[in-house]
Amino acid sequence: MNNKQNTIAKLDSDSLSLRPLSLWQITWRRLFHRKSALIGLGILGLLVLIALTAQWIAPYDPYNVLIGKEDVVRRQKPCIHLLGCPEDQPQHIMGIDGNVRDEFSRLLYGARLSLMIGFSTVTFAIIIGTVLGALGGYFGGWVDTVIMRTMDVLLAFPSLLLAIAIVTVLGPGLINALLAISIVSIPAYARVVRVSVLSVREMDYVSATRALGGSDMYIIFRRILPNALTPLIVQGTLGIATAILDAAALSFLGLGAQPPTPEWGSMLGAERNQVFTAPHLVFFPGFAIMLTVLSFNLLGDGLRDALDPRLAHMSG
């Protein structure tokens, strides 16, 4: 009897071990075999860690003006004791900005704001774009025509110029900049979802659900969209990088985050005329923007390859 039970248990364990992997398990395995995606994921993880711990690792308050508190001057060069800076001088790893604030502390807090901008704008754009694209792709006819022609009108304008126009109408500020970036990002997600819905809506399981009396909203949100999210994930990952760049551009022009908010684009804009006299104040925020955008692009490319079996096969 015990031998029979042991045999059954072994067969059960063997069947579990032979159970096919889910799509997401396969995707993660493919993703971790791509060095570029791992590099992007590592950089992004470091940035998220910095954003979460900025208040503990930043040596100074990013809004704190050091006049009268330390022996520093405007746009002072970086001072690092380990690299030979005199011990009697206060250490400022990335120097002092034009308003006599610690550049390193402001850069750390800027990571928090930039990531928040990227994730919040893309989340809003994905929600609205997904709903519009799903409705247009599923119902077709005049519903599809109205939605997609509206998206075409928005796509006819360069995204950054349209965002500038929207912020100009609404007024400068971080919230208005986030709203503008979200609006100009919606058409891309709507088109991606529409194409996916068009390819999925005629599947047999959708027809079966419709024949069993499933409502249109149930079919869209419970049957079609869960199977049409793959390209949306890739588009969203790459879209975060674009949103961060657009937000930095708006802040650089004075239309986004307003001083003294520690935002990388506004930090660049404030010191853009000092590129030769104080290059460190331009280099560090610019490098932070470049590194963040690079991490999302590498991760997005890796996700695209991992989620597309054809690309995965071609890449080896």
Image (cartoon, rainbow, N blue to C red):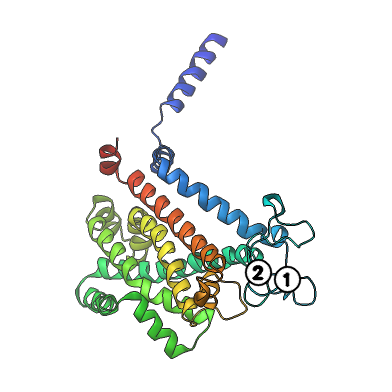
Q: Which residue is mark 2?
A: 76
Q: Would residue 202 be found to the left or right of residue 5 on screen?
A: left
Give the class, few, some or many, for how many residues have Cα within 10 Å of label 1's Cα (few <14, many ≥20).
some
Q: Which residue is mark 1?
A: 72
Across and down, in percent, residue 26 comes to 39, 39
The quarter of the picture where residue 184 lies is bottom left
Q: State how many labels appear.
A: 2
Give the class, few, some or many, for how many residues have Cα within 10 Å of label 2's Cα (few <14, many ≥20).
many
Task: State whether residue 24 is above or below residue 199.
Answer: above
Task: State whether residue 16 is above or below residue 290.
Answer: above
Identity, as a three-letter code, of the amino acid under mark 2:
Gln
Identity, as a three-letter code, of the amino acid under mark 1:
Val
Q: Would residue 236 be found to the left or right of residue 286 on screen?
A: left
Task: Determine the residue positioned at 50% across, 60% down.
Answer: 287
Task: Determine the residue positioned at 37% across, 55% down.
Answer: 234
The quarter of the picture where residue 86 lies is bottom right
Furthest-left residue in this view: 141
Secondary structure beneath dot 1 equals: loop
Q: Are marks 1 and 2 in contact (CB under 8 Å)?
A: yes
Q: Is residue 1 visible?
A: no
Pick the quarter of the image with the N terminus. Answer: top right
Mark 1–mark 2 distance (CA, rounded to whole Å): 7 Å
Task: Determine the residue positioned at 38% across, 85% down.
Answer: 165
Task: Determine the residue positioned at 46% across, 53% down.
Answer: 295
Asked whether 312 or 162 is in front, the reply is 162
Across and down, in percent, residue 163 comes to 39, 79
Across and down, in percent, residue 75 comes to 63, 72
